[in-house]
Image (cartoon, rainbow, N blue to C red):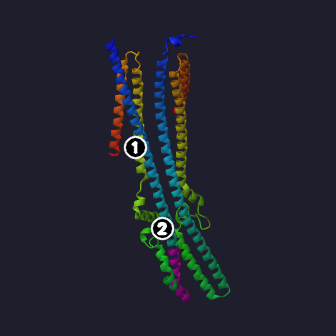
Amino acid sequence: MSTSGISNPERGKTLVLILTLLNMVLVASISALQVDASIRSNQANRDSQYYAIQVAGSLVQTGAQSDYDLNTFSKWLTDTQESLVASYSALQRQSANDQQGYERLTLESRIYQAQADQTKTLSVLLTDPAYAPASDQASPDMSAYLADLNATSLAIVQKQNGASDAYHRWSNKSDSYVALLTVLAIAFFLLGVAQMSRPNVRLLFSAFAIGVMGVGALWGLVLLIL
Amino acid sequence: MENSQGKEDRLSVWIAVLIALVSFTTALTTWRTASLGSKAGDLIYQGLLNAVKKQASANEDWSRTYQEAGYARDYLVTLSGLLVQENSTDPTSQEQAAQLRTYLLPGMKSLATPLGTDPSYFSPGGLLDVQKRFQDLENQSPDLSSLNPQTSFSQADTYYSEQRWLLLGTIIIAVSLFWLGLSQLEHLRPRLLVLVIGVIVYGFGLVWSLLVEVVFVILRGGVL
């Protein structure tokens, strides 16, 4: 039976105290890192939500804009076709020697044509060189129009995705730091038990605490680097 | 021998008092650090609320702008057809145009005003200047359109910055606890030197924390 513990009951207490204080510094440092990760997570979460609000607004605007633009284009198309139909019908009435019918349908055709001309000046799809048809037979470049229409929303969505990813990254890191602090709390517990134990058991608990602190320090380092 | 023991005891008491003081300072700076985080969180919440209000107002204005643009288009198109009818030689068509101008057009014009009637809303190419109309609508509700979420976010960032720097002060003060704790070990030599190191580190941490507080309060224009 060893008598060293009985001869010097204070043996190892200084080591336990130093380990406790070192653990405290480690906890303080990890707490600082946890707070920093938490701040970055909050900021990224804020940005993510702010961009989400903006993209919702952008979609409302583009929805109203596309509705107006496409309705205007549709109206131009309808008036143009109505004008053509009236014009052809007028020619047919003329062939049938129906002068009154010819004049009525010609007037109708002119009315529709005037409306189509007016609609054309109001349509971005028909006047903007970026989308306007190259010829009377061609259609507006809808792909370019839709791409331009959604460009702002897509750019905001990309920012929102980036912020959301950053939020998850920092949030996970913050959670890991909290877990690490829990591990270091175990080291505190082991050191507390060590301080109250017999000298030979004290050293054993101190060794366990050193192991836990080592794992904690290593984990903290990995989190810091990644 | 007894005199030396008495000195050691007095030193131990002073160290205990210092440790209590440092612990209290640590608690104080920790509270302040948490409080700063809370204030930053409140400002972010406020900023997001303002962003929602501002965006809701903008959404309403965009919807109204394009609704008015639709009315303006319908009015202008109807008017162009009406002019053809009025200028025709057909009495029936002229009569129909007169009826339309009397009974239909005023209502359409009323809905289309001002986008379809005010020349300042027409771009040189003939397109309706919806952006100008939107801006005018925004200007009609300055309490909502002038909300700036970024102001709250910037203020929140200053609180977060202060929180980071103050946390550094808290850690320095916590490190001083390490040295003060060591100086409490009676068999440690030179005990006084360890105590002095602890006091210096504590003083540095305290001055650091106070400086951080003063600098950021000045940066925020006197707001705590």
Q: Which residue is mark 1?
A: B158
Q: Quadrant of residue A112?
A: bottom right
Most common secondary structure along the magenta stretch: helix
Q: Tell me the quadrant of the picture where the N terminus of chain B can be found.
A: top left
Residue that appears at 41% across and 35% down: B27
Q: Tell me the quadrant of the picture where the C terminus of chain B can be found.
A: top left
Q: Which residue is mark 2?
A: B128
Compared with B223, B18 (above or below) is above
Residue range (magenta) = B74-97
Q: Residues within 10 Å of mark 2 (few under 14, many from 20)?
A: many
Q: Is residue A113 visible?
A: yes
Question: Mark 1 or mark 2, which has the lower sequence index?
Answer: 2
Residue that appears at 53% across and 27% down: A189
Which secondary structure, mark 1?
helix
Spot occupied by residue B105 in the image (x, y as percentages of width and height): 49, 80
Spot occupied by residue A38 in the image (x, y as percentages of width and height): 49, 40
Chain that bears disc 1: B
The amino acid type of the residue labelled 1 equals Thr
